[in-house]
Amino acid sequence: MKAWIKKTLLGLFGVSLLVGGLSACGHRHHGGGMSQVSAEDAAKWRERMLERAGKELQLDAAQKQKLGVVFDKMREQRNALVGSTTNPRAEIGTLIAGATFDKAKAQTLIEQKTGALREKGPEVIAATADFFDTLKPEQQQKVREFLNKRGGRWG
C-alpha cells in the first residue's frame, strides 16, 4: 500500500503520538516541519487524507466526518506538543550550549511535552476509538491487515 495510508492509519491508532512527540521536541524535515505549515496547507492535507482514506476503506459520510475529527484532534495534539517554539531543534540545542548539560531545562521540556500528551491524548484516543468503532467489520479487517502487512515498519 501507499505510504500515506500507512502513516494515516498508524496515526489513527495512537502509535504516531509518541513519534510526533519526539519530532516536536527536535526533529525537523528540510525546509521546516509541520509547525511551519499554514492552517490553509493543513486543511488541504486533511482533505486529501480524508479523500484517500475514504476511497481505500470505502467510508460513508458519517465515517469520514469521524475521521476528520480524528485528524483535527491529532493536529491539536501536535500543536500542543510543539507549543510556541518555532525552532524545536534550537530549543534542544540550548540543552548542550553550556559547559554542562542543562538538566533542569531538559526536565522542564519533558514535563511540557508529557503534559501536552496527558491533556490532549485522551481526546485523540476517544476520537480514534469513535471512528474505529463505526467501521464495518470488513473495514476494520482492512485496517488490521494493513497494519499486519506492514510489520511495524515506519518508512
Image (spheres, grey):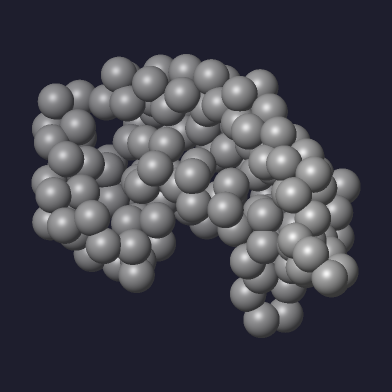
Displayed quadrant of residue 117: top right
Q: What x and y, as percent, mark residue 65?
A: 50, 29
Give the quarter of the figure containing the C terminus. bottom left
Left or right: residue 46 versus residue 8 is right
In the foreground, 15 or 60: 15
Q: In this view, does 69 lie above or below 25?
A: above
Q: Is residue 49 above or below residue 97?
A: above
Q: What x and y, as percent, mark residue 89?
A: 74, 67
Left or right: residue 88 versus residue 19 is right
In the foreground, 47 or 122: 122
Give the quarter of the figure containing the N terminus. bottom left
Q: What x and y, as percent, mark residue 61?
A: 43, 29
Q: Is residue 116 visible?
A: no
Tell me what residue is drawn at x 32 percent, y 56 percent. Answer: 6
Tell me what residue is drawn at x 42 percent, y 27 percent. Answer: 128
Q: Is residue 51 above or below residue 72?
A: below
- Residue at the outermost bottom position: 30
How many numbered circles does the render carry?
0
Tell me what residue is drawn at x 61 percent, y 23 percent. Answer: 118
In the foreground, 18 or 7: 18
- Residue at the outermost front position: 99
Q: Can residue 148 be seen in this view?
A: yes
Tell me what residue is drawn at x 53 percent, y 19 percent. Answer: 122
Q: What x and y, as percent, mark residue 69?
A: 56, 29
In the foreground, 52 or 21: 21
Left or right: residue 26 versus residue 37 is left
